[in-house]
Image: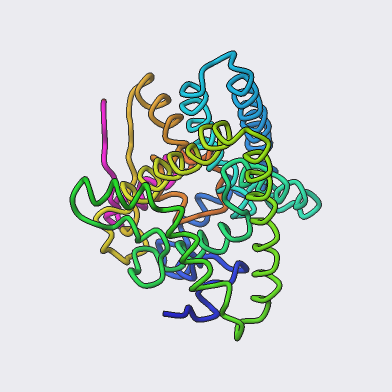
Amino acid sequence: MALPAAAVGPEIENPRDAPSAPADREALGLVRPYQGMVAWPTVFLALGIVAAFALGTTLATMRIIPLWLGLFFNTLILYASQTPLHEACHGNIAGKESRWLWLNHLVGYACGSVLLHEYKAFRYMHLAHHRDTNNPEIDPDHWVAVKGPLNVLFRCLTIVFWYHQYFWKQIAFQYQIPGRLPLAVHIVAMHAIYYGIALGLSLMGYWREVLMLWIFPHILASALIIYFFAYLTHMPHEVHERYRDTNLFWFKGKILGPVANTLYGFQTFHLIHHLFPRVPFYLYPKAFRSLKPVLEREKAHIYEFGH
């Protein structure tokens, strides 16, 4: 099924995000202080991720640490790289400061490259997910909306292959939509660079390192990302209401809360992100506390853990 033009362009977020109902207008006023700033913590996180990926790859390549440990380490690093890549997709690094837009895109390309997800392709697909959350025909993340642990595991481990199929079939070759041909050419060129580097290193004798330190971590980290950031956060994958199509996991406690939020990349508050995608991830807890009365009135899916 080809996507309509309005469903895949990067220019707008989900039309449901526009404030219209009284609850939306109230929520927009409450959340306004948490939007629009240059997100320097995200920039520093991105720098740390790129440096950590380079360090882990170097240590494993030199056999200072074994390849299996490098695989584990790089998988965790690539899992973390989703956060700044995701923030860049929404323009959250530059905020309202257009003069920092170059930095926003630089972070997106850098973190996308180490994760082996091309920035522009990932952005188009992710914004399609926002516009049509839980739509089985259009939402690219709906691939993991299946029953049974083995089916979920298989879908998570194959998400990168599904993303490729989805992008080329549903977006890139829709030439009736303006800008699709240049986009397709750009994506082809970027993937040629990525896989050209991988192939070149493999031909030089580093095929074990390429597989263990980049390709396999790419697949495993993407599986973790889609499970925690899409499968769990959108269960049961059938709701289409603005305040109820995404879950919020509220971990309480001075230890449990910070640990769970950090390991989850603050997507424990995924509902906040879907309601207001321009709030930086590290401000989700504050935004949640401000929005909690509105969310409760709208019967949002809030799951509490700890006390």
In this view, the residue in front, 91 or 108, is 108
Applied colour scheme: rainbow
Q: In the figure, 74 relative to 118: above or below?
A: above
Q: In the figure, 193 relative to 219: above or below?
A: below
View extreme (left): residue: 148
Residue 141 included in the magenta stretch of the image: no
In this view, the residue in front, 158 or 201, is 201
Q: Quadrant of the N terminus?
A: bottom left
In this view, the residue in front, 167 or 178, is 167
View extreme (bottom): residue: 176
> What residue is rendered at 26% in x and 63% in y?
238
> What residue is rendered at 51% in x and 23% in y?
67
* Segment tinted magenta in the rendering: 289-306
View extreme (right): residue: 99
Q: Quadrant of the C terminus?
A: top left
- How far across and how far down the image is residue 246, in percent? 34, 54
Tell whether 18 sits left or right of 190: left
Residue 290 included in the magenta stretch of the image: yes
> What residue is rendered at 42% in x and 25% in y?
258
Quarter of image, res 264: top left
Tell whether 267 sits left or right of 45: left
- How far across and how far down the image is residue 177, in percent? 61, 82
Tell whether 154 sits left or right of 147: right
Number of on-image labels = 0
Q: In the figure, 153 relative to 74: above or below?
A: below
Quarter of image, res 124: bottom right
In this view, the residue in front, 157 or 5, is 157
- How far across and how far down the image is residue 65, in percent? 55, 15
> What residue is rendered at 70% in x and 48% in y?
104
- How far across and how far down the image is residue 87, in percent? 58, 47
